[in-house]
Amino acid sequence: MNRPGLLQDVLQLTSEHFVLVLISMAIAVAIGIPTGILLTRRPSLRTGVLGFANVMQTVPSLALFGFLIPIPLIGGIGKRTAIVALVLYALLPILRNTLVGILGVEPAVRESAIAMGMTGRQLLWQVELPLASRTILAGVRVATVTTIGTATIAAAIGGGGLGVFIFRGIASVDTTQILAGAVPAALLALISDGGIGWIEKRFSAV
Amino acid sequence: MGGSGVAVRRESVDGSLMAASPGATVEFRGVSFRIGGNLILDDLSFTIDAGETLVLLGRSGSGKTTALKMVNGLTFPTTGAVLVDGQPTTTWDLIQLRRGIGYVIQEVGLFPHFTISANVGLVPRLLEWTPERITARTKELLEQVGLDPVQFMDRKPRELSGGQRQRVGVARALAADPRLLLFDEPFGALDPVTRVELQNQFLALRKTVQTTSIFVTHDVREALRLGTRIALLDRGKLEILATPQEFLKSRTPQTRAFLDVLEL
C-alpha cells in the first residue's frame, strides 16, 4: 500500500464523490419539487407517483445499480448510471415533503389568498412555497444525507467516488482503506446535514 | 366593480373619509346548491341594495357560509345565479371580482410569513399601487381599526392577540376601497368584550364607508345590532327577510327560536 499517495487519493475521491452527489441532488430537486407541486393540484396522480417513488426506495441499492446496467441509454457502466440510480433514490423524500408542506398550509390562509384575488401563480410563489419551504428543505436534507451514503455503492458499477476505497479495502481486507472511504463520506454527510439545516432555519418563513 | 380601487375621496364635515363610489348590489336568483344527495341551499332569492348591511343569520349547517362564498366565487350555485352588480359570478373575471371584495373570516387567515403592513397592503400590492400609496393607506387603516401603526406595522401576526389579529383582518379587507365586504362570523372566536368592541368599530365604520356588507353570524344579538336587514336561513331555505324591528315582532317558529335566546 502506498501511504504517501493516500491523502491525495482521499482528496480526489472525496471531490469526485461530492460532485456525484451534487449532480444527483440537483436533478432530484429539479424533478421532485415541481412534481410535488403538480401532485398538490392533481390528487388523482398522487397514489401512482408516490407509489413509484416508494418502490424505487425499497429496492436494495446495490440491486438497483445492477438492474440499470443492461438498460439502454440510461444504463451501462459508469457515472451516468450511478446518477440515475441516486436520483431515483432521492426522489421520494423531496416529493413527499413538497406535497406535505404545501398541503399543510392552513386552509384559512389559502382561502384568504384566493378570496383576495391572488392568481394561481401568486398563491404558489407568495404563500404556498414560502410557508412550505421549511418542510421542503427538510426533505432535501434527508435526501442529501442518504445520497452521500448510497453513492459509495456507485463504485460497484464504475461510478467512482469514495466507494472505490471501501470496495478496494474489503477486497484486500485493509481496514485503513475502508476507513479512508468511510470517514470522509461520514464527514461529508455531517457537513451537508448541518449546512442545509442552517439554511432551513435561516430561510424559514414564519 | 371598483377593481382598480381608485376611489375619489373627500373630507366630510366631521373629518372622516367618505368613499365617493356607493357599494355594489348583489342578487340571489333561484340559487340552489347540492353536494351529493344533500340540498345545502334551496331556491334562495333576494336582493341586497347598495350600501346596506345584510345579515345572514342561521344555525350551524343552515347554508349561510355557502351562500356567502357564492358572492366572491369561492363556490357556485348548482342551479340559479348570484349576480354582483347585475352580472352573474359565472361570467365575472374572478380575479377582478375578488380584488374588489373584502373578505373577513373567523379564522382571520392572516399570512403568517408577512408583516402586519404586508398583510394589510396585499390587495393594493396585487393591484400594483405605488409603494408610497400602499404605506400611507396601511397606516390610515391601522389607525382606523384602532391599532398604532408605529407599534404594529413591522410585527408578524403571531405576535398579536386574537382581537388584534381580527382588527388587522378587517383592515386588510378594507385596504383597496372595496365596494362589497363579506364577513363570515368574524367575531365568533373572540371574547365577549372584544367582540362588542369590534362590533362598535364596525358600526362606526359603516358611517364613514358606504360599502355594501354581507355578514354571516349565528348570534341573534349581533344580527340585530349590525344588520339593516336580517335574512334567516333554515336548512338552506330563506325563512324570513326583515329589518331588525320587523324581525323582533315576527312569530314564526324559527324566529321564535332565535328570539328566545334574547330572553335568557
Image (cartoon, helix red, strand yellow):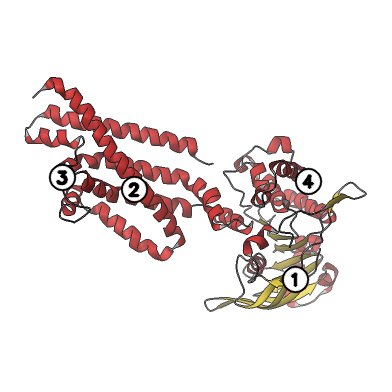
Disc 4: which chain? B
Residue A33 shows which numbered tag?
none
Q: Which marked residue is nearer to the observer: mark 4 or mark 1? A: 4
The residue that disc 3 covers is A157
**Marks 2/1: CA distance?**
55 Å
Same chain, marks 4 and 1? yes
The residue that disc 2 covers is A28
The residue that disc 1 covers is B231
Query: Which amino acid is tagged 1?
Result: Ala
Disc tally is 4
Tell me, yes or no, whether the two marked residues, 3 and 2, touch with CB atoms within 8 Å: no
Quadrant where the image shows the N terminus of chain B:
bottom right
Query: Which amino acid is tagged 4?
Result: Gln
The residue that disc 4 covers is B144
Q: Is residue B219 left or right of residue A19?
A: right
| Earlier residue among tags 3 and 2 | 2
Q: Residue at x 14, y 29 (%)?
A: A177
Disc 3: which chain? A
